[in-house]
Amino acid sequence: MKTAIYPGSFDPVTYGHIDIIERAAKLFDRLIVLVSTNPTKPPTFSPAQRVDFLQRSLRKSLTTPEVNIEIDCHSGLFIDYFKKRGANVIVKGLRAMSDFEYEFQMALLNKDMCLGAETVFLSANVASMFLSSSAVKQIAQFGGDISAFVPHQIADDITNHLSTRSG
Ligand code: ADP
């Protein structure tokens, strides 16, 4: 059984992430979407909120028995989690060359720390290659409409959270 892990901040999840999740789920027997902590990017939403956003956005897939997607959360070293779960593949999305340098470095480091850890890069969809969590947050903060960028189940919660914070 091939288990893949798609790690990210998902702060919050966007249609770009959803696209990668849906495509990756078709390629592997099991896909774990892992909400992780990037020490260089302090998150806006708590790990529990980010997991909740993913669960609500993916509810349809999560309740379809033949779709094997799991959502989890981890705050330590990613490769320790990868080994503990007996995973085979790390999934990453690439929007542009700007993503590549960092992701390529991470792929090499992970392979160095765990020989079996192969990273598979999926290219972003043309429709969402401009999309990032931080852009969505900036738009929401100023009361802009984010419904084209994030699932409708979570759009209002994101806007309310950010507009309250920015006063
Ligand atoms: P962000 O850069 O939006 O904060 P994350 O840390 O949550 O993203 O990203 C997790 C993974 O998802 C990374 O591999 C990233 O390249 C990928 N990703 C993020 N946004 C998109 C998108 N719009 N299309 C494809 N992949 C994406």
Image (cartoon, helix red, strand yellow):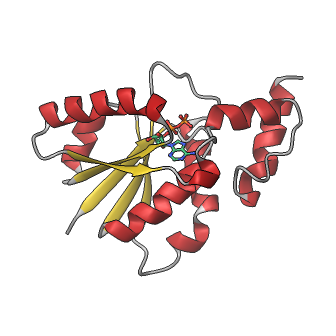
* Residue at image coords 39%, 70%: 26
* Residue at image coords 80%, 34%: 139
Q: Position of residue 113 (x, y in %)?
A: 14, 32
Q: Position of residue 133 (x, y in %)?
A: 63, 37
Residue placed furthest toward the left: 115
Quadrant into which the N terminus falls: bottom left
* Residue at image coords 47%, 18%: 40
107 displayed left or right of 51: left
Identify whether 126 is placed above or below 113. below
* Res. 114 image quadrant: top left
In this orientation, does residue 115 appear?
yes
In this orientation, does residue 45 appear?
no
Residue placed furthest toward the bottom: 65
145 displayed left or right of 114: right
Identify whether 110 is placed above or below 152. above
Q: Position of residue 56 (x, y in %)?
A: 64, 60
